[in-house]
Amino acid sequence: MKRMKRICLFFLCLLAAAAVSGCTAEPQITTSAAVPTETTQPEDGGRTVRNDPDAPKQISSRTITDFSVNFFLESRWSGEEEHFFAFSVREDGNGTLTASEARTGLSLPADQDLLEKLQTVIERFDLVKRNGEYDVTAGLAPEYQPCTLDVGYDSGERLTFTADNQPAADWEIAVYTAFAEWFSGKGEEGLYPSRDNSEITRLTLAVKEAGIRVRYGGWNVDAAEAINGETYLLGRDTYDYNLEKETDSAMIAFPEGYYASVTEIIAGTDLLRQYDFSYFDHDDGYYGMGVRPEDPEEDSETEEIKLSLEYASGKRVHIETRKISEILALKPVTDALLRYHEALFE
């Protein structure tokens, strides 16, 4: 649904551009053998298409020698609002192959690991089939301005195309992730949101498997049920949807260091980072931990995860999904939390 909304937004921008220029909704299409010059650019809403017949649709080499790409991604940012990125891998003035991102200023000597990551993305999305394309619509909003990918190989072959940017394109997200993970592995976190280093102050976890839900969280009780005078207790309950009844419940006082422990568990995962980057997909039940299937995925009737976190900083996280792909991807997080809580109630 979210992707359909983005596609609709693209065409609304296209129609708006045509209306501003006095054109009809049908875009003007110009075909040529070269990229349009300043004097040949079409009016707003016009589309220029060029295809290089000599550009190979198969490239024999897998060894990248240089790489550059620019794009706008709605779900990735640096600073507060920067969504434009320009990545490159090329020799610097001293002849050192260097990976960089122009907007953030990140720059480090490149290595084979990064080049292999980028080639994997190219192959995964079959980007070579777009080699030689130039397909650009004039007058679109900034987020749809042309995106260009240009890659050189040790065989002398090149992969190059330019097209209207798609701000939610999966291949662009994959390129971004390849650079972000590589820079992060070398101690540069500039392509990720700032880490929240505050402590969790509230947590609720509910995991439903095969129709049986186990839930942990804080419960307020009356004075008669207080433990050591504490009326806010850590509780566990189990509900069997197959039997349609609660089968177990228990309460304990919060152990010393509880919130520090659950904060450490969450900090040892990519949950917060992926949660922030995937915000457009949250209503659809996806939180960035897994690869979202291309085909529509039905909600499971027997499996579900609900996880709510509140931090001392005020940050809040709420995950609620019945998508099997996302549930499987979240298992390292939920399993670690379940193991910790189960040990407390033994």
Image (cartoon, rainbow, N blue to C red):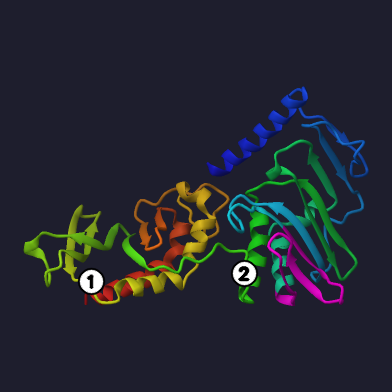
Residue 220 sits in quarter: bottom left
Question: Which element type, helix, strand or loop, lies under badge 2?
Answer: helix
**Part of the protein shown in magenta:** 86-113
Residue name at image x 18 percent, y 61 percent? 247
Residue 328 sits in quarter: bottom left
The residue that label 2 is drawn on is 181
Circle 2/circle 1 CB separation < 8 Å:
no
Q: Position of residue 20 (x, y in %)?
A: 73, 26
Q: Is residue 217 left or right of residue 78?
A: left
Question: Which element type, helix, strand or loop, lies under badge 1?
Answer: loop
Q: Position of residue 243 (x, y in %)?
A: 20, 55
Q: Looking at the image, which is closer to me, 293 or 275? A: 275
Residue name at image x 55 percent, y 48 percent? 295
Q: Looking at the image, which is closer to me, 155 or 113? A: 113
Query: Is residue 90 inside the magenta stretch?
Result: yes
Q: What residue type is disc 1 on?
A: Phe
Query: Is residue 95 inside the magenta stretch?
Result: yes
Q: What residue type is disc 2 on?
A: Glu
Number of other residues with Cα within 10 Å of mark 1, as a class: few under 14, some 14 to 19, many 20 or more: some
The residue that label 1 is drawn on is 254
Residue name at image x 63 percent, y 66 percent? 180
